[in-house]
């Protein structure tokens, strides 16, 4: 069954059905414009991560402002982006099953596709599928720059894998994937700078090993919203993969940007609209956004304009707010929640409602919702 849209174009905010994902378009566009200006001044390229929004419309807005394409984590996400009109997609993850590798090769008939590898056998299997489809795709070696997730763990390992790619019949060596995910949420600027500096040293050592063997590294891609302030100053990265900057979330707001500033320099444009459905309990109201409507991996959401209050997802369909004597929130009132982590919240909904001046202007389909394969 296709879910009903929570709103229609021209509808007022107070008439949007809840719970719903809402984007303030004025703030969203300011975030996109700010990033475009920063990237242009840095001389780097921007390849935003589509895993955050899972919405081709957002990706197209970013490309209109100079982004060279998008990143995806899954082949199914990449398929949705290509279907939505995106012509350049980098899959920043490892894919190993034969069925998925075949889909990667087939997708290369429709768009410019890149992919990351960190294993010899998976790389050879990818080449076989590309040969069967008679396509050649760009392949980046993923290196571990401190996140200790995927990626080869030494310059020599990267060199050996790059040699395989260079000698493969249907693969082009496209450079290095050097993304430090955990660095994005280190709380102090000093901690993030230290992580970026360590990652840059690993990139340098790897590029030098490739160069010594006669292999040119055209692109080093990585970086993110949390480390942007540092990433744009390091020559080691040619392309940045910031994603959350367009929407932002409560967890990023906990980062210390400067001695007296918090966040990332971007604004919260992304909210979960919820409505009070019960006020029977003393000094508490119950809203209609619970655990199934609010991702909790990064903690509870904050409440816009009521930052002194806490929002508790007490069960699947209930969220509770404890009130002070001064708070006048009652039955039918609406609250705008700032989720702890924007990425998994998007994956809970079919639609994103774009508002401007309190009126619905756009409704985006979350095309890649549930695209986990």
Image (cartoon, rainbow, N blue to C red):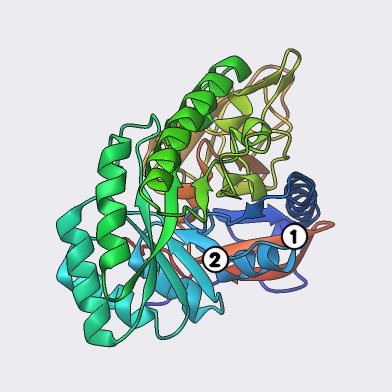
Q: Tell me the residue at 35%/41% (across/down).
A: 143
Residue in the foreground of this view, choosing between 244 and 14: 244
Dot 2 surroundings within 10 Å: few (below 14), some, or many (20 or more)? many
- Where the N terminus falls, by quadrant? bottom left
When asked about the image quadrant of residue 120, the answer is: bottom left
Q: Tell me how far mark 2 sits from mark 1, CA to CA.
A: 16 Å
The x and y percentages for residue 244 are: 58, 45
Q: Is residue 361 left or right of residue 274?
A: right
Q: Tell me the residue at 64%/37% (across/down).
A: 228
Asked whether residue 293 appears in the rendered view, the answer is no
- Where the C terminus falls, by quadrant? bottom left
Q: Is residue 155 above or below residue 345?
A: above
Q: Is residue 317 left or right of residue 195?
A: left
User: Label 1 near label 2: C-beta < 8 Å?
Assistant: no
Residue at the extreme right of the image, as rendered: 357
Q: Tell me the residue at 42%/77% (across/down).
A: 2
Residue in the foreground of this view, choosing between 118 and 215: 215
Residue for badge 2:
55
Q: Is residue 244 above or below residue 174?
A: above
- Element at label 1: strand
Look at discs 2 and 1 and give the one toward the viewer: 2
Q: Tell me the residue at 64%/45% (across/down).
A: 245
When asked about the image quadrant of residue 108, the answer is: bottom left
Residue in the foreground of this view, choosing between 14 and 186: 186
Q: Is residue 366 left or right of residue 269?
A: left
The x and y percentages for residue 67 are: 66, 61
The x and y percentages for residue 154 are: 29, 34
- Element at label 2: loop
Mark 2 / mark 1, whichever is N-terminal? 2
Residue for badge 1:
355
């Amino acid at each position: 069954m296709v879910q009903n849209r929570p709103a229609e174009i021209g509808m007022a905010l107070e008439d949007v059905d809840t719970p719903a994902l809402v984007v303030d378009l004025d703030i969203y566009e300011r975030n996109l414009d700010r990033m475009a200006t920063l990237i242009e001044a840095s001389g780097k390229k921007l390849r935003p991560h589509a895993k955050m929004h899972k919405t081709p419309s957002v990706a197209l807005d970013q490309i209109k402002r100079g982004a060279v394409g998008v990143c995806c984590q899954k082949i199914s996400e990449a398929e949705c982006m290509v279907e939505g009109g995106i012509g350049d997609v980098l899959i920043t993850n490892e894919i190993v099953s034969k069925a998925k590798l075949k889909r990667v090769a087939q997708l290369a008939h429709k768009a410019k596709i890149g992919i990351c590898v960190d294993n010899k056998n998976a790389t050879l299997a990818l080449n076989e599928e590309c040969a069967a489809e008679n396509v050649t795709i760009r392949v980046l070696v993923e290196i571990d720059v401190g996140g200790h997730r995927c990626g080869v763990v030494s310059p020599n390992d990267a060199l050996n894998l790059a040699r395989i790619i260079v000698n493969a019949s249907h693969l082009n060596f496209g450079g290095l994937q050097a993304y430090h995910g955990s660095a994005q949420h280190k709380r102090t600027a000093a901690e993030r700078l230290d992580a970026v500096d360590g990652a840059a040293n690993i990139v340098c050592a790897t590029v030098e090993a490739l160069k010594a063997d006669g292999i040119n590294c055209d692109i080093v891609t990585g970086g993110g919203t949390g480390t942007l302030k540092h990433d744009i100053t390091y020559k080691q990265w040619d392309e940045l993969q910031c994603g959350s900057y367009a929407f932002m979330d409560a967890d990023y707001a906990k980062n210390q940007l400067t001695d007296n500033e918090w966040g990332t320099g971007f604004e919260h444009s992304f909210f979960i609209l919820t409505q009070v459905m019960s006020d029977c309990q003393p000094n508490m109201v119950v809203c209609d956004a619970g655990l199934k409507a609010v991702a909790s991996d990064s903690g509870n959401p904050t409440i816009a304009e009521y930052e002194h209050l806490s929002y508790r997802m007490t069960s699947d369909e209930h969220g509770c707010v404890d009130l002070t004597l001064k708070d006048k929130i009652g039955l039918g009132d609406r609250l705008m929640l700032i989720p702890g982590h924007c990425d998994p919240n998007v994956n809970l909904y079919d639609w994103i409602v774009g508002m401007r001046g309190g009126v619905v202007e756009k409704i985006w389909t979350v095309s890649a919702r549930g695209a986990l394969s």
